[in-house]
Every structure is written in C-alpha cells, then in structure tokens.
Image (cartoon, rainbow, N blue to C red):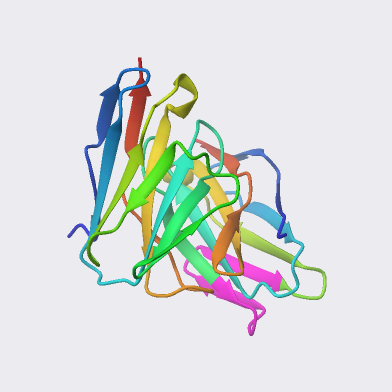
Amino acid sequence: DAMVIQNPRYQVTQFGKPVTLSCSQTLNHNVMYWYQQKSSQAPKLLFHYYDKDFNNEADTPDNFQSRRPNTSFCFLDIRSPGLGDAAMYLCATSRDLAGETQYFGPGTRLLVL
Amino acid sequence: GENVEQHPSTLSVQEGDSAVIKCTYSDSASNYFPWYKQELGKRPQLIIDIRSNVGEKKDQRIAVTLNKTAKHFSLHITETQPEDSAVYFCAANYGQNFVFGPGTRLSVLP
C-alpha cells in the first residue's frame, strides 16, 4: 500500500509557466520534505514542514514555494520554471525531526520545455 | 555545517562477491546514519540504518558498521546479486535534517 504518494509522476511544463506538484501521505507523519534530485546526484533538500511550521533551506531559490494545507498534503509550487529546474522532485515524510527515518514518495519527474 | 563524503563513486563486483561502501561525516553531533538504495527512475528506499549507540547492525546480506571516533560508517553487502545493482546513498542527520553523500553506483556483474 502506498504510504507517500506523488502526483503526477511526470510533468511537462513550459519555460516560465507556473507548475504545482503534489504529495500526500497516509502515515500521519509530522514532517514533510521536498527534495530536488538531478541526474546522478544526491537528493538536495529544498524545504520541510514540521506540522505547520515551514523551514526553508538557505540556498533554495525564491522561485520555489510550498504549501501544507493539512497533515496529509503538501504542495511544491514553482513560480517560473527555468530549464535548470528540470529534475526529479521527491517528497519524503518522517514521524519527527532529528534522527527519524525518512520515507520517500516515487517522485515527479519535471520536464521544462 | 555537516559534510558527508562517500567512496567509491562507482563500484563493480562479480556476482557473489562482497561490496563495501564507505562514508565519513564531519559533525560529531550526528547520531543517525541511514543508507538508501535507489534504482534507476525509482525512489530512494531505506535498506538499513544505524544509531550512534551501536557499532554494527546486520540484516541478512547487508550490514552497517559505525566508528564514532573516526566519524566513519560503512555499508557491507555480501553474496551480491544482480538485483543489488543500484545507486547507494549514505546520510547523516544534521540538526533537523539529513545530509546525503554523493552516492555510489554499484554494478553487480553476472
């Protein structure tokens, strides 16, 4: 049974056209993360939510925003996608912070034309 | 901040041989070290983890060792099989988050 679900699995957008990726979880975890992963590289953390508290990584571009309307759902908004934003976007959850296992969703592969 | 190094970046072994991947971390406060396996086009999947209060943990063909003094931890896979071929990432917790190593591409040759 899927525990961390991401939709869509593949997303094609145009340069500069806003796009939203979604993530949902059935684990009732407090923490939800968004990672960007480019080919042959490690996942790079963009931000995370601990419950409703938003925590942005210092080097995450302003072009990336996130919303968490409730415990189960979290969205990644890319306001003006550039060619360099083409990547796999991974959502992950953990029960708590500081040393808790993270469970990843299947990812959304974003293509920017 | 935390820095996690991982070696080797690529590793090829014959089926049935063992594979060892090593990681080092810089923050002595790190106390949780997971290992993830990522097959092509799929999500990272946790395969084993270790906390700083133990030195070794084993799960069938997979084991992880931790040397807190040296800030080293290693993944050991015995009796490798072709389905072990994937990219493996180590990670260490840092504050509220994780820092991942750059990954090791393991190829198990039949």
Q: Could you tell me which residue is drawn at 33 percent across and 45 percent down?
A: A76
Residue A56 x, y percent position in the rendering: 50, 54
Up-down relation of residue B77 to residue B102 (above or below): below
- Name the outermost residue toward the top: A113
Front residue (pair A22, B81)? A22
In this orientation, does residue B77 appear?
A: no
Residue B12 x, y percent position in the rendering: 62, 37
Residue A89 x, y percent position in the rendering: 39, 40
Q: Could you tell me which residue is drawn at 64 percent across and 85 percent down?
A: B53
Up-down relation of residue B85 to residue B65 (above or below): above
Residue A23 x, y percent position in the rendering: 26, 51
Q: Please identify the quarter of the rendering in which residue B92 is found.
A: bottom right
Up-down relation of residue A41 to residue A45 (above or below): above
- Name the outermost residue toward the bottom: B53
Q: Is residue B37 left or right of residue B3?
A: left
Q: How many marks?
A: 0
Front residue (pair B101, B47)? B101
In this orientation, does residue A20 appear?
A: yes
Secondary structure mainly formed by the magenta segment: strand
- Name the outermost residue toward the right: B70
Q: Is residue A94 left or right of residue A3?
A: right
Q: Could you tell me which residue is drawn at 69 percent across and 71 percent down?
A: B66
- Does the segment drawn in magenta span residue B51? yes
- Does the segment drawn in magenta span residue B77? no
Q: Could you tell me which residue is drawn at 40 percent across and 63 percent down?
A: A49
Q: Which residues are magenta?
A: B50-66
